[in-house]
Image: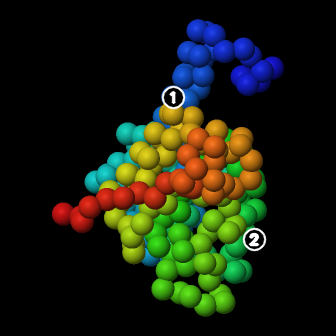
Amino acid sequence: MALEDLSHNFLTGSLEDLVKWARRASMWPASFGLACCAIEMMAAGAADFDLARFGMEVFRNSPRQADLMIVAGRVSQKMAPVLRQVYDQMMEPKWVLAMGVCASSGGMFNNYAIVQGVDQIVPVDVYAPGCPPSPETLMHAILTLHEKVRTGEITRRRDSGAGAALVTPESPWTPEVPTAVRLGTPK
C-alpha cells in the first residue's frame, strides 16, 4: 500500500512530513559534470563550502544510488542520449538541477552540436544561473530544491501531467515552470 492510497489524517499527515524531511535531508547527487561548471560543483563539495551539512557529501557514481542529477555544463548532441539513460536509471523520486547557462539554455554555443537547454532531454526542477555559477549559487539552488520538496510542490507538478501548463485555473497568468535561482551580485 502506497502513501497516496491512505486517507489523510493526523498520522498520515505526520508521516508525509517525515518522508519529505527524509527526502530533502538525504539527497544523493549523481555528478554529471561536462564543462567548467563541474569545477565549481567540485568546489561546492569541498571543505570550504561543505555540502555535507545538507546530507550530500558523496557524489554517487552509480545512477541507481542517486536521486539528484546536477547537470553542470554544456550538453552535446552525442552526450544527450547518455544523459537520458542516466536519468532513466535513477530511482524515483528523482530531481534535476541545471547548473550554468550552458545547461540551462545552451549558453554562447548556439550551434548544431550543443543541446539548447537540458530541459529538452530531462525535466528540470531548478536552474542555477551563471557562467560558471559560484558554489554559493549551487548551494542556493539546492536549498531552493529542498524547499520545493518540503512544500510538496515538485510532487504536485509531476503528478499533474506532462510538462508545464501555460494557463492553470488557480493562476491564469503564471506558467507553472521550474524555478530559476535569483541572486544578487556576488561579493
For label 1, the SS is helix
Percent across and percent down for residue 75 are 61, 75
Instruction: Find the residue positioned furthest to the left.
Output: 187
Q: The disc labelled 1 sits on which kind of residue?
A: Trp
For label 2, the SS is helix
Question: Residue at position x 73%, y 64% from top?
Answer: 84
Q: In which quarter of the image is residue 43?
A: bottom left
| Quadrant containing the N terminus in the rendered view | top right
User: Which disc, if any, is residue 21?
Assistant: 1
Q: Which of marks 2 and 1 is nearer the N terminus?
A: 1
**As drawn, 54 above or below 79:** above
Q: How far is the residue under mark 2 from the one under mark 1?
A: 32 Å
| Quadrant containing the C terminus in the rendered view | bottom left
Instruction: Find the residue positioned furthest to the top.
Output: 10
Percent across and percent down for residue 91 are 71, 44
Q: The disc labelled 2 sits on which kind of residue?
A: Pro
User: Which disc, if any, is residue 81?
Assistant: 2
Left or right: 21 as drawn, with respect to 131? right
Q: In which quarter of the image is residue 114?
A: bottom right
**As drawn, 110 above or below 22:** below
Percent across and percent down for residue 170 are 59, 41
Residue 110 vs residue 49, the one in the foreground? 110
How packed is label 1: few (under 14 Cα within 10 Å), some, or many (20 or more)?
some
Question: Residue at position x 68%, y 45% from top?
Answer: 158
User: Which disc, if any, is residue 109?
Assistant: none
